[in-house]
Image (tube, coloured by chain):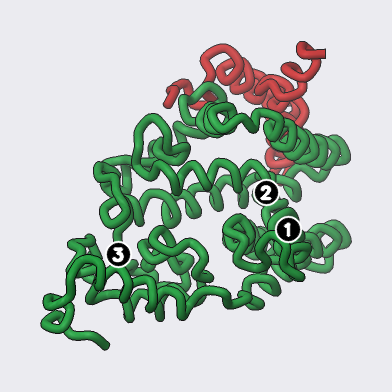
Amino acid sequence: MISAADLSRLSDAELDALERQIAAKYMKIVPWGAVAWGLTNLMVWLSLWPLVLFDALPTWAAFLIATLCVILSYLPSHEAQHNIIGNRGSKLRWLNELVGHLSTIPLVYPYRVLKATHMEHHAHTNDPELDPDYGVHADSRLAFLVRSILNRQPESGRSGAYPAALARVGKEALFIDALVFQAIYLVVLFAMALTEHAIEAALLWWLPRHIALTYIEYYLSWAPHHPGHDQGRYRDTRGFRSRLGNLFSLGMQFHIVHHLYPRIPLMKTPAAYWELKPILERRGCDLGGL
Amino acid sequence: MKVLVKLFFSPLLFAVLFLFPLFTELAQLSTDAVSGIPVWQPALAFAVGLGLLAQFRGSWIGVKG
């Protein structure tokens, strides 16, 4: 560990080099855990449907598991969005794309849309006009919850944020992916309802998805970027200490590392954070007492 | 075609094809009829009411974000 006194003697260029050198140790690591997580999570969620329909599992228990599955469905795809599992041209590229496409099915968000809009989020974090995730910002946790509910209304301003981001980067065609995903989701809900399984559909997909969207938005968008006023490499993301711990906050306490070095796998961000912490402190980052 | 796509994704259709059966099933967990009225009737009225609110006010809860 480098002391603050040692760091104070480094020039800005030397500090940059040291920061990159530390970060590089945690990159180019295949996150096999995220691969297994993404694929297993999808299989568990899919298996709930026959288990409930054939009365092998109580619906209330399936609801709890389904909610957990949908909450956990985003992050493996997030690794793929950053090409962490397999970069372009690598042997594992197919696996990167497979995990990316499959893992977010329960969330009803297509991989290509998430990837394109997420890159815009990274490029323009906290920019009110250009950050497609800016709409989740709110002054307090309660205000976030209210905003999250309002954002989900059919004609909310937020519902146009992703299509607008796709249009800005010339990828409007990807909106078809979103329509197809949404259409399949609705067909399943309608078919289940028409065959007198509306409660099962609501508790396996509809309600878990709504809970998961709020949970994911809170930990991935609101908490690490709060209050959302600052922009810039060392100012747009913060560290924070979650009362629920690192696991239940989806590893987002260390999200600042992800924004600085998006190619570091999620499971390596805590270790990278602790090693980078003295540098981040010298940079004046908001580490939230972490 | 555009009209059909809009209709398919409309809140009103969601209310009729999903919320109405859902509310009916939920009501039927306790009873099939209240004061002689089959529970599907108030379930339909409630679902369509919500659907109309979402369709024409742009919000299921009457307040837009």
- Helix, strand, or loop for circle 2? helix
**Pointer 2 chain:** A
Residue bearing the label numbered 2 = A111
Asked whether the viewer can see residue A193, the reply is no
Q: What is the secondary structure assignment of the residue under circle 3?
A: loop
Q: Earlier in the sequence, mark 1 or mark 2?
A: 1
Q: Give how far across and how far down residue A49 sits, in percent.
A: 81, 58
Relative horizontal placement of residue B15, taking residue A164 as reference (left or right): right
- Label 1 vs label 2: CA separation? 9 Å
Quarter holding residue A82: bottom right
Q: Chain of mark 1?
A: A
Mark 3 sits on what residue?
A240
Relative to A266, residue A171 above or below? above
Q: Please tell me which residue is depicted at 67% across the width and 19% down the height of the picture.
A: B48
Same chain check for tags 1 and 3? yes
Q: Quadrant of residue A74?
A: bottom right
Badge number at residue A282: none
Residue displayed at 29% across by 45% down: A231
Q: Are marks 1 and 2 in contact (CB under 8 Å)?
A: yes
Are the residues flagged by discs 1 and 2 from a single subunit? Answer: yes
Which subunit holds the residue at mark 3? A
> Upstream in the sequence, badge 2 or badge 3?
2
Sequence-first disc among 1 and 3: 1
Q: Which mark is residue A97?
A: 1
Give the amino acid at mark 3: Phe
Please name the color used to draw chain A: green
Which mark lies nearer to you, 1 or 2? 1
* The chain in red: B
Tags 2 and 3 in contact by the CB under 8 Å rule?
Answer: no
Query: Identity of the amino acid at label 1?
Result: Glu
- Vertical position of residue B41 compared to residue B56: above or below: below
Image coordinates for residue A245, horizontal then vertical, percent: 39, 73
